[in-house]
Image (cartoon, grey):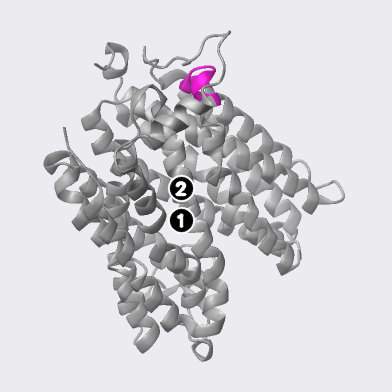
Amino acid sequence: MKNKKASESNPWLFIPTQYFAEGVPYIIVNQLSVAFFKSLEATNSFIGATSLLSLPWSIKFLWGPIVDGYLTKRKWLLLMQLLMSVFLIILSLSFALPGIIIISLIIFVQMAFLSATHDIATDGFYLIALDKKQQAFFSGIRSTFYRIAMIFSGGFLLYLSDLLAKKFQNIHLGWSLTFAIAGLIILFIFCYHLIILPKPIEDKAVISENSKIPFKEAFASYFKQERIEYVIAFILLVRLGEGILLKMLQPFLNDPFDKGGMNFSWGEIGIMYGTFGIIALVIGGILGGWIIKKYGLRKTILPLILCMNVPNVLYALLACYRPIGLWKIDFSFLSFLPGNSQDMHLTFNPMVQFSIIIEQFGYGLGFTAFMVFLLYFSKGEYKTSHYAISTGFMAIGLIIPGFISGFLQEIIGYNWLFTISTIATIPGIILLFFIPINDD
């Protein structure tokens, strides 16, 4: 039975900000850092090696029992938010020092471990502070705000750094101010959460001062669940097609026609994803949570997972036929804005924009179901550790295909790569028929 304290706290007050704060550092470390290092003229081999920065999110289940064992989940997530904001501000103040690339790499490594630990505590707090129906409904909300954080960190912050660099004619200053702004935003969220987060009675350390950290018990209880081998295989394989597709989508849209791409500028790609794409994602995420809450996970997981994977075929078709018809929206009437009003227009391909909308909407539906599935198999007093183990497997299921996708694209091209990504969705869907799900 959920405690009164948690039930009196409106989850709308903290779930959106919690998962926005979870997404921002992840994207800064894993995506924004690539543009950062490239702008500082780091070699491509160095940038490729930074893919290891995602490792802490894959192995975070190793210290999940420590988060379960000491302090409360509330204290853990607040502490991580405070430390992440401090490290970002330190990074922003380090650009006057020599060797900024090495300094920033060290800070990103620290940020990766802090952010992964923050994920464990945030997801554990979610399981404690919300009842089962709230968990199902807000799973769509939390995934939506996580994705909004991705747009903010990978799109707005990148645009801001470029804008500031051009304004001050200084790349280092542009990045310094950008990281300072990001750090201050997380610091503001920390202060807000310090006031607004509930203090559930169930949120307590599992072990006493004289006890040992329950690594063995947490892992043993996870792997003793019914048909766990099928559950793990499903977690690893259900996003295999997405993993192959994900890293190559934007290069496909950006590459010129003679390299098999769609020849869009980065600004056009950002607008297509950041406007209609994010609207479709939000609608899909909220609708997915409502569907699961109304009809239950058992009846809805198959069609919702299909919604997440089937849109891959649209990109395979785009890569094969590459429609070239363009629509232009003229914004020159906004002459009161700074800049050359004659250049203010948006060019987009309607078929590409349609594919992005369908993909983002389907992702919102399917990923919501997948996250509820992971919650379903997080049980008992070590539910936080169970969830960390599951999300660790999920990360591995994306890292490996993402790592090889670039090599595959260079060998077989975008059309065959996206075709393979569509076929790769089938094994995960088949595994659903072997997994026991009881809505009770």
The outermost residue toward the right is 98
What element does badge 2 sit on? helix
Residue identified by numbered label 2: 393
Residue 391 screen position, x and y as percent? 44, 43
- Residue 122 vs residue 305: left or right? right
Residue 323 appears in which quarter of the rendering?
bottom left
Residue identified by numbered label 1: 397
Residue 281 screen position, x and y as percent? 31, 55
Three-letter amino acid code of the residue under disc 2: Phe
- The number of callouts visible is 2
- Above-or-below relation of 244 to 140: below
Residue 92 appears in which quarter of the rendering?
top right
For the point 17% across and 37% down, which residue is it? 439
For the point 38% across and 75% down, which residue is it? 330
Disc 2 to disc 1, C-alpha distance:
6 Å
Highlighted range, magenta: 66-75
Mark 1 packing: few (<14 Cα in 10 Å), some, or many (20+)? Answer: many
Residue 426 appears in which quarter of the rendering?
bottom left
* Front one among 404 and 249: 404
- Above-or-below relation of 433 to 334: above
- Above-or-below relation of 360 to 235: below
* Front one among 275 and 363: 363
Residue 153 screen position, x and y as percent? 53, 51
> Is residue 72 inside the magenta stretch?
yes
For the point 36% across and 34% down, which residue is it? 224
Quadrant occupied by the N terminus: top left
Q: Main secondary structure of the magenta part?
A: helix
- Above-or-below relation of 340 to 182: below
Q: Are marks 2 and 1 in contact (CB under 8 Å)?
A: yes
Res. 240 visible in picture: yes
Res. 342 visible in picture: no
- Residue 207 vs residue 374: left or right? right
